[in-house]
Image (cartoon, rainbow, N blue to C red):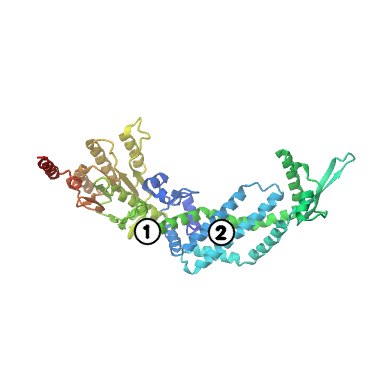
Amino acid sequence: MDLKDFSLLYPDFETQKRHMSGEAVPNIDTFELEELGLVEIFDMKNRELCEFLTMDKKSMEYRLETFSDMLECPEIAVTLNKLVPILSDIMELRRLDLDAGDATAYLSSITEIELYISSIDTLYRGLSEARDKIRGRALTALCEYVSSLVESDYYRELNAKLRELTCRVREIKSVTIGVNLDAQLRPAEAGVLSINSEQFRSGDMLEKILRLNFKDDEYTCIAQLVPFGKKQSENEKTALSLAFNSAIGDVYKSSLRSWKKIVQTYVLENTEFLLNLMPEIEFFVKGAELLSKLSNRGCKLCRPEIFPAEECAYSAIGLYNPAVALKSDGEIITNDLVFDENATIYVLTGPNRGGKSVITCACGLSQVMAQLGMFVCADSITLSPVDAIFTHFPTGAEDTIDKGRLGEECDRLRDIFECITPYSLILLDESFSSTGAFEASYIADEVLRAISYMKCRCIFSTHLHQLVAELEAINADAEKNGYALIDTLVAGIETGQRSFKIHRQKPDGKSYARDIAIKYGISYDNIINNFNERRNKNG
């Protein structure tokens, strides 16, 4: 296997190359993912999650195989989690300056080999345990590569060489330094006489008594070197350390040169391969963790059926919002949502806190999770990749001082319309709520007509029930000119309680008000009955 071509995200090098060049990459950034609520439950530390989104069907299916393996074999995620800190240590070593050719570089080279072998052994042991259950192409190829590596003669020789060199280094406990003096007893020259496997011992009489050893030998110190005295400055201590490192570097110069060749010709290539996989490993570990949480919560997950982008397909059965599901202790409410020839645009109405925002975000999240190559939160789903997702949700007061709230909303919408194509998804949640019903309905009518002309998929969640009355005229123009049709969705209320179920039907704004009034006891009948009861009671 050519290491530079391997990826857990892309089935072949050409697909990866196209993604890196910007092809088949949807216009969905971190802002949209935050608005949809995905960043909160799928938080990447080293890369932006939006970097992993794709429109390429082969890449989505390739990733689904890996997620399927990880859900089937939780030990894979455990193994990859163990691998990440080892690779992080290798990256930290790479950041150090190892070109000085001294003892530090020598020890760092050995440490990198130790970390590399540790990473390969971790992968080998972990993947071997799950090997019989792995079906996906990516993890199968990784298993085969790691197995062939561990079982190779070169890898065994590398382990043997490492043990030999590590033993040589680890047994160093002290060095014997010789100093020549001139006639005035000043140091003239100094050098390392020997490298020892024992530490020197203090010549202090009290310590000799404590050791019960009064014998003086070549390892008994009769006087400490001054630079390591307590009153010496850091510069004086550093001077001796630098001199020592230089001398040790000379001792190991030949070993260091041969050792660095091993690192450069073999280990660097293989560790580079693993380091390049680090962002991909984090993506799959975090993604599998999210899917496992949902599964353990009793939520259903399905493999999306991917259609070509040109078909603009979307049909979800039993759709739910994962961000809400993970926070809720109650029953998970699911809904069906279909974009078809009768409607690619929906106006969604209903009571406040009735589930309008939840289903709007659930639609966007299902699209995003599919285009990340993940299982989707639904009983079943068929969809086409979108080239962009644009969200227009309520915002705070930023940038509203000069423009006003309505001006800021319109400004954002103008920027969105400059990027929309027929393959985009637009999610509008309570847009134009900052102005009166008359002005809001007028602007919403204009926006819906424009979206109908562009023929993209859209959910417009709104409090403007009167807007529904304008849809007949908009659809009449749409049918006449071949534009996209608009239909209505309703967040339901049953016996005065919010059901959070979404129905494809015409809304009845009065029924919401009547049910809510009854629920809180402020219907005409309730008010009059309570008033009469109090009056009769008080005589």
Q: Is residue 403 left or right of residue 53?
A: left
Query: Image height check: is 30 above or below 275?
Result: above
Residue type at numbered disc 2: Leu
Q: Residue at x 42, y 45 (%)?
A: 30
Gap between marks 1 and 2 measured at Cα:
38 Å
Question: Label 2 neighbourhood size at 10 Å, few (<14), some (14-19), many (20+)?
Answer: few
Query: Image height check: is 139 above or below 38?
Result: below
The earlier-in-sequence mark between 1 and 2 is 2
Q: Indicate the secondary structure of the residue bearing disc 1.
A: loop
Front-most of residues 458 and 355 = 355
Front-most of residues 306 and 436 = 436
Quadrant of the rendered image containing residue 118: bottom right
Residue 254, image x and y in percent? Answer: 75, 54
Q: Which residue is mark 1?
A: 297
Q: Is residue 308 left or right of residue 151?
A: left
Residue 102 image label? none
Residue situated furthest top in the rendering = 402
Q: Nearer the viewer, mark 1 or mark 2?
A: 1
Residue 93, image x and y in percent? Answer: 62, 50
Q: Which residue is mark 2?
A: 3
Q: Residue at x 42, y 54 (%)?
A: 372
The reply to whether dot 1 and dot 2 touch (C-beta < 8 Å) is no
Name the quadrant of the N terminus.
bottom right
